[in-house]
Image: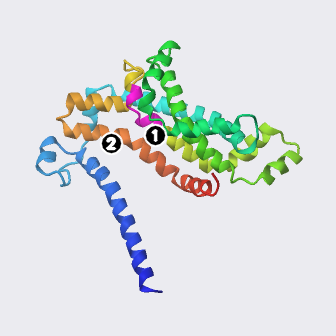
Amino acid sequence: MPIGKYALGFIRRLFLALVVVISLVPILWTLLSSFKSNQEILTSSFSLPRAFGFSNYTGAFGNLPLAAYYSNSLVISAACILLSLLVFSMSSYVFARFQFRLKGPLYAMLSMSLLIPVTAIIFPVYVFVKEIGLYDTKLGLVLVYTALAMPVVIYIMRSYFLTIPREIEEAAYIDGAGFLGTFAKIILPLSAPVMASAAVLIFLTAWNDFLYALILTTGDSSRTVPVALAAFQSMYGSDYGQLFAASIVIVLPSIVLFLLLQRKIESALIAGAVKG
């Protein structure tokens, strides 16, 4: 094997190792710091904790209604995932398989909406949610986050549906399956990878959003964990141990969900890259 090929492989592995280190070191440092006291963090930032205790975690949950915010985020994120997968899977399948009037302009409009910053539509969204009586409600946030996730979810789902051979559906139609039966029993089981990818994207949209959760809610009954973290930082920002503990608790579900669905996400990205 030529020396250049060895060198290229070494550089590629070195680059990947560097990316892994850059990604993991901040998380590991935050995790270790969440078990330290303020004095330990300020005097020896990169040392191991003297003792592994959960006082910072209990303090973080005690100083703010973090458990209520956490529950709100879980409910809102789960509702967004269920609603989005149900509605957008059907609409993406229609975009991928059927011809109808204004299909091109509608899909172009959805694609162009990816270029609109979410901050540019804050005011009309606020007015709309206020007018329909969903201000400071979980349902209001669910509808907003579902709408924000719509363009990218439909895009990746449509791309994946285009990779499924039409012969599978035609065989189901010949066997007497209708449209809904074919979609529910054939297409959806084959679409598990793209469903996993879409679920992660929807979850991240709903779980990590701070701006809309702050503007569209006022009380603890509907606010989510990013708002809780911002409030904690403003009130207890000098207590670094508890701040790091709250950060770990908030970021943990995103990491766990991605690890659980990693293989399906990879297969969906590979399949979706074939057609678009």
Q: State the CA–CA distance, disc 1 to disc 2.
A: 15 Å
Q: Residue at x 49, y 29 (%)?
A: 76
| Of the pair 103 and 142, the residue shown nearer to us | 103
User: What's the residue at 54%, 56% (across, down)?
Assistant: 266
Secondary structure, mark 2, is helix
Which residue is the site of mark 2? 248
Looking at the picture, how far across and down is residue 30, in whole percent? 27, 47
In this rendering, the answer to whether 126 lies above or below 85 is above
Amino acid tagged 1:
Leu
Tell me the amino acid under the disc marked 2: Ile
- Residue 80: % across, % down: 54, 32
Callout 2: 10 Å neighbours few (<14), some, many (20+)? some
Report whether 34 appears left or right of 41.
right
Query: In terms of secondary structure, what is the magenta stretch mainly?
Result: helix
**Front position in the image: 123 or 226:** 123
**Above or below, 19 relative to 217:** below
Q: Disc 1 on helix, strand or loop?
A: helix
Rendered position, 22 above or below 98: below
The residues colored magenta run: 205-213
Q: Is residue 73 left or right of residue 154?
A: left
Asked whether residue 55 is in view, the answer is no
Mark toward the viewer: 1 or 2: 1
Q: Is residue 209 magenta?
A: yes
The residue under the point 34% across, 63% down is 18
Is 168 covered by the magenta stretch? no
Residue drawn at the location 65% of the way across and 36% of the way down? 105
Q: Which residue is the site of mark 1?
A: 204
Q: Relative to 60, is 68 on the left or the right? A: right
In this orientation, does residue 273 appear? yes
**In which image quadrant can residue 229 be found?**
top left
Query: Residue 165: image x %, image y %?
Result: 75, 54
